[in-house]
Image (spheres, rainbow, N blue to C red):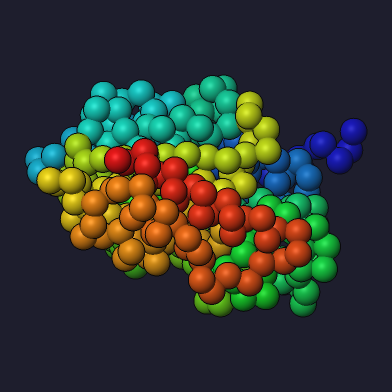
């Protein structure tokens, strides 16, 4: 019973982004933020994280909701629930890959509570890390997954830590060329979502570059891919509720039967969302004929270095690219 109890802490409702930033800066490493509550509470129940101050972002109204921009893009508040993103008319009508991706997250109950910001900024799902092992990501000096159970872990682009990014929303947003808007003590900054994610070669203890005293405010989706051809698919161990083993999001500009531009992004393969540039380069400028699709989807991870029990992900990645390109056709 004691294990399920959260240690005493101070809960503070932040009413503005400025106030939230001030509180995070003031309390330093003793503070944590909470929004949809679908993950941070579990960390605290397990006593893996024990903040003394919990800054609640939910009261910050400007971080909720979706607005269509003048140029036909979208500004999505980081605290917008996944179910709101999933069912928003412009998302379903003009950017359906995002609707499909977030619609595959967890269960309806969790999508009603969880936020789009939380989905893309979530921490590693590695069972060793989350169980309190002193691995690299937790400040230790080993990766237990490499010598242990690694079937769900990364097969490429890793360095010491082989965790795989678990987000479904991230692949769709990266395929759409989204930016993230972040505010901290040094002001506001905007960066491509592809640069928001951090691999272990840069910082092995985090998954994103969101600093402790910063707040993720918005996700800006440009109009570039509005009404393009899209595809999303997620492979998971359980059909009802699970994180992706591998997922894929595709956005394509197909005119006159020719692929003039294309983005293929996958998670479950690397510590950050993986742009499948080898496959993109093979099909860009060609038609989506079955022979071209087969050629483009053969060996899409040429530099992969899988573990013995996750080598199956290489064939899975090839097959998902094949299905995505066929779906675009």
Q: Residue at x 47, y 60 (%)?
A: 298
Q: Which residue is drawn at the image coordinates 56% and 62% (left, top)?
A: 270
Q: Point out the image quarter for the N terminus.
A: top right
300 on left or right of 221 = right
Residue 95: give x, y in percent of width and height.
27, 36
Left or right of 123? Residue 111 is left
The extreme right residue here reads 1
How many numbered circles are shown? Answer: 0
Q: Nearer the viewer, residue 232 or 90?
A: 232
Q: Quadrant of the C terminus?
A: top left
Q: Viewed as shown, does residue 80 lie left or right of 140? A: left
Query: 276 or 109, which is in the foreground?
Result: 276
Residue 19, percent from left and from top: 40, 49
Residue 76 location (% of width, % of height) = 31, 40
Q: Answer above or below: position of 163 versus 120.
A: below
> Which residue ends up furthest to the front in the rendered image?
291
Residue 63 in sight here: no
* Residue 71 can be seen, yes or no: yes
**Residue depicted at x 12% and y 46%:** 256
| Foreground residue among 292 and 137 | 292
Name the side, left or right, on which 51 lies relative to 215. Answer: right
């Amino acid at each position: 019973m004691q294990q399920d109890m959260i240690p005493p802490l101070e809960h503070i409702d932040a009413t503005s982004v400025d106030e939230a930033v001030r509180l995070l800066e003031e309390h330093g490493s003793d503070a944590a933020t909470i929004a949809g509550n679908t993950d941070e509470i579990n960390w605290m129940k397990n006593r893996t994280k024990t903040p003394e101050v919990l800054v609640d972002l939910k009261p910050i109204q400007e971080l909720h909701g979706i607005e269509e921009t003048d140029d036909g893009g979208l500004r999505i508040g980081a605290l917008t629930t996944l179910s709101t993103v999933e069912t928003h008319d412009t998302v379903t009508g003009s950017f359906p890959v995002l609707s499909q991706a977030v619609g595959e997250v967890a269960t309806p109950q969790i999508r009603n509570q969880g936020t789009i910001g939380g989905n893309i900024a979530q921490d590693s799902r590695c069972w060793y890390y989350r169980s309190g092992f002193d691995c690299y990501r937790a400040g230790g000096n080993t990766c237990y997954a490499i010598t242990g159970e690694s079937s769900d872990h990364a097969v490429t682009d890793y360095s010491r830590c082989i965790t795989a990014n678990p987000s479904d929303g991230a692949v769709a947003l990266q395929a759409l060329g989204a930016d993230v808007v972040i505010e901290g003590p040094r002001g506001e900054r905007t960066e491509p979502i592809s640069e928001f994610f951090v691999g272990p070669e840069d910082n092995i203890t985090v998954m994103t570059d969101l600093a402790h005293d910063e707040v993720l405010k918005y996700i800006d989706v440009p109009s570039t891919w509005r009404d393009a051809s899209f595809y999303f698919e997620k492979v998971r161990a359980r059909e009802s509720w699970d994180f992706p083993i591998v997922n894929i999001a595709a956005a394509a500009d197909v005119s006159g039967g020719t692929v003039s531009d294309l983005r293929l992004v996958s998670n479950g393969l690397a510590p950050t969302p993986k742009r499948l540039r080898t496959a993109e380069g093979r099909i860009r400028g060609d038609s989506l004929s079955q022979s071209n699709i087969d050629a483009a989807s053969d060996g899409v991870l040429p530099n992969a270095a899988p573990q013995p029990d996750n080598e199956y992900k290489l064939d899975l990645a090839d097959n998902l690219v094949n299905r995505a390109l066929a779906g675009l056709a």
